[in-house]
Image (cartoon, coloured by chain):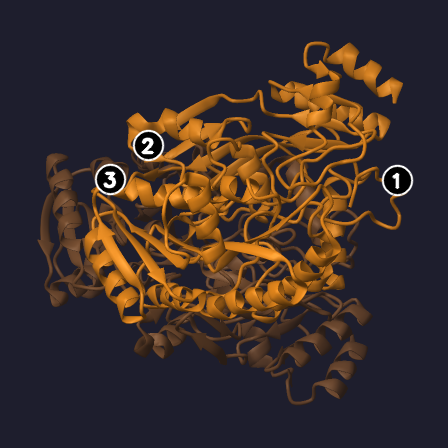
Chain colours: A orange, B brown
Amino acid sequence: MNNVLELLKAELPAALSTDPAALAACRLDKSGHESSTPPLAIVNATTIAEVQATMRIATATGTPVVVRGAGTGLAGGAIAGDGEIVLSTLGMTRILEVSEDDELAVVEPGIINADLNTALASTGLWFAPDPASRAISTVGGNIATNAGGLLCAKYGVTREAVLGLKIVLADGRLMTLGHRTVKGVTGLDLVGLLIGSEGTLGVIVEATVKLRRLPQGTPSTIGAYFSTVEDAARAASVISASGLRPAIMELLDPRAMTSIADYLGVTVRAESFLLVQTDGGGAEGEATAALAIIRSLGGDATLTTDPEEAARLMALRRSFHPAMESRGTVLIEDVCVPRSTLPAMFHAIDEIAARHGVTIATVAHAGDGNLHPNFVYEGAEVPEAVWAAAHEMFQTALRLGGTLTGEHGVGLLKKRWLRDELGDDQVDLQRDIKRVFDPSGILNPGKLFSEAPDTVRASALAE
Amino acid sequence: MNNVLELLKAELPAALSTDPAALAACRLDKSGHESSTPPLAIVNATTIAEVQATMRIATATGTPVVVRGAGTGLAGGAIAGDGEIVLSTLGMTRILEVSEDDELAVVEPGIINADLNTALASTGLWFAPDPASRAISTVGGNIATNAGGLLCAKYGVTREAVLGLKIVLADGRLMTLGHRTVKGVTGLDLVGLLIGSEGTLGVIVEATVKLRRLPQGTPSTIGAYFSTVEDAARAASVISASGLRPAIMELLDPRAMTSIADYLGVTVRAESFLLVQTDGGGAEGEATAALAIIRSLGGDATLTTDPEEAARLMALRRSFHPAMESRGTVLIEDVCVPRSTLPAMFHAIDEIAARHGVTIATVAHAGDGNLHPNFVYEGAEVPEAVWAAAHEMFQTALRLGGTLTGEHGVGLLKKRWLRDELGDDQVDLQRDIKRVFDPSGILNPGKLFSEAPDTVRASALAE
């Protein structure tokens, strides 16, 4: 271990940090998980060469490496612990190129999502991935988790916004994947494989991302109350099934609404709330059609094109997470189901919460079928009843044709359910693919996959 | 070898074919390549169980397997030769499910692309991938090559239209990849890895594909003549850069136009032709804007909303391939470059053709930067001058930031240039990934990748 530190200090004196406060911060992300011990050191890389040097030393010494951006992950994927090097790419923030003609940008991984869009504003182009964390999360982190967000049903997930990547392999070699063309099928799609790989395959050091034209015109925004969450979910499903494609369609259950009202000090009805925003040239017509569907299914709705009123409605949604955090400790879940089964999933969540005596407030990206049930509890440890309820919720999502995680990733939080969704054969195959990239298992060990039987390193991470 | 045949005959008597004419047909696809010897046998699978049985026998006997759909590939990826089993999925044509609410279909791989869309017509939904071969190519083949087509700039490639896959591994195990939700990030993205893998990783036996709503309204169609191909390419680049997103934007050079005119017996100008079609609610406005750009850049253009006139213009484009085939033997190329470099790429093609004394007629999916230079020559063998010119063309595309193949794949045709684009390290890594799926190297050996030094089987395929 001292040997590693000496090597890092000798080769990367300016980038290396062993500041206790900085090390302690790397024990957490936004998942609520915390490792039991701080990591060994942080390398604050600002160049590809520094990333390569770090990986060469890690390989030479068999030291595990946790790649970390802003640490805003919700699944524990970038939490670091005993004996691990944190390789921070947060200092790699440059925009290397913007091509308006080819609608792409080449960026370093540490740039904050919102900062990229601020820099792009004058071009009329934008990077569409829009996780709720966009003001604080990095583009590299968005790519490592294949981040979603509020706009996915219309504008796609991060996967749809990445053309090419430069990665540093476990042994320090640099590799260029993908292309800067709209299409390209030369060889296997390794860009797609890296996206969402949660730091287990390589270190993303540069990304060529696809940009879109900013939508024109004034968005139309609908706020609609429903007396039951199933009715609200049904309205969302029918809007999708009718072929409408709102930019935003968010559903908040009554507990979410009450918490938000308390947090903001505003008055709302203790009912389910569906927030729909359409944009682009057809915004008004789409909103009118969505409004008719909502009203025909019992929604009490208003439509606005006033930017202030729209901002007020959006603020309700955007206050959800701080509102929940003000109520206790929060476990944020992330199941995704086929859109037509949204009402059934909401119904099951209520039933599971009641039966286990746990508190769950749910927001859903209803256009995607992606639900974030938030378990609220007291204290630092997740109570057994919460895990039991979460377990049943995952099984229900899988039974409905859904998935454990729509956009947050597996990290530490869900690896124990990985085989329930993928099956043993596929998990073993995926582990073998990881081994191709990382034969000595130093890249984010114990994340996404559980430790392999043949990996002897004892993980110090809390599970 | 007899052992293999006996095993196949014993286990799959109805599916097995050794009919010489059928075997001979598998020596070719639409690439112009031909293996020197027919394959050993064909298994005409109609069930997943038959595919699994075939792969178990192949693994047990170490027999190579070439998975084949309709045989319409343009890179030699499904050509079979000496000692190989052809595993045909052409008989697996069922539509297992259509969910209008969730906008997806579950299909077997052998269904013809156009047949799927015919079956979907009454739902108002469609499967968007639109290769020029859609009337004759299978959905499984579209997935295996990540097929593109005329509509990609607006509607995406096959990758964007596949949610989940069932595959049979080399050893006969069945595996389910992906999901039926809009989003999902559980584990590594193996669906993306399989798409475009050209039969080298597994046998696609079922696909859950994303459907789209058919665009509403009447399309607007523009036909525009330009005095130089660079001017036409510039107009296409500017239309893309302006943020317009035509459904179709095809560019034909003067040699293409002259050949089409001869073939159809119609009169055209021996100039470059840009065909633009906009669709959906904003079709007319988008077409008007595109028309203004075209005219400002010297195009002599007409705009029509008359379906018959639009069909007449589209027929010119759709006659390109038969027109070229009527002129001689054709090598269809498939480079893709950043859209802004289309004029430079067209200029380079003319220069290369002149210098090598070869005939090249080019059509381009101009909205994607994807060019199909067609080399026309006499006789069955590709002349050395054609390969020399193609080689220079590939190097030029790579230098412009492009790729060897936008949508046809590598197959046999381009594997000798694979390392020029991907580099040695990446090719070796990709081969190692293949080995995880196919440790004994029986899945489409010698395609996409060249034979490994450690693979002793002598390939009988022509190169």
- Cβ–Cβ below 8 Å for labels 2 and 3? no
Q: Position of residue A184 (x, y in %)?
A: 47, 46
Local crowd at mark 2 within 10 Å, few (<14), some, or many (≥20)?
Answer: some
- Under mark 3, the amino acid is Pro
Residue under label 2:
B344
Residue A338 visible, this angle = yes
Q: Position of residue B237 (x, y in %)?
A: 27, 38
* Chain of the residue on which disc 1 is drawn: A
- Secondary structure at numbered mark 3: helix
* Chain of the residue on which disc 2 is drawn: B
Q: Is residue A335 above or below residue A17?
A: below
Q: Is residue B187 above or below residue B141?
A: above
Q: Position of residue A282 (x, y in %)?
A: 21, 53
Residue under label 1:
A458
Residue under label 3:
A307
- Cβ–Cβ below 8 Å for labels 1 and 2? no
Q: Position of residue A122 (x, y in %)?
A: 29, 26
Which of discs 1 and 3 lies nearer the camera? The answer is: 3
Q: Report the residue at 76% width, 73% height from top.
A: B56
- Cβ–Cβ below 8 Å for labels 1 and 3? no
* Chain of the residue on which disc 3 is drawn: A
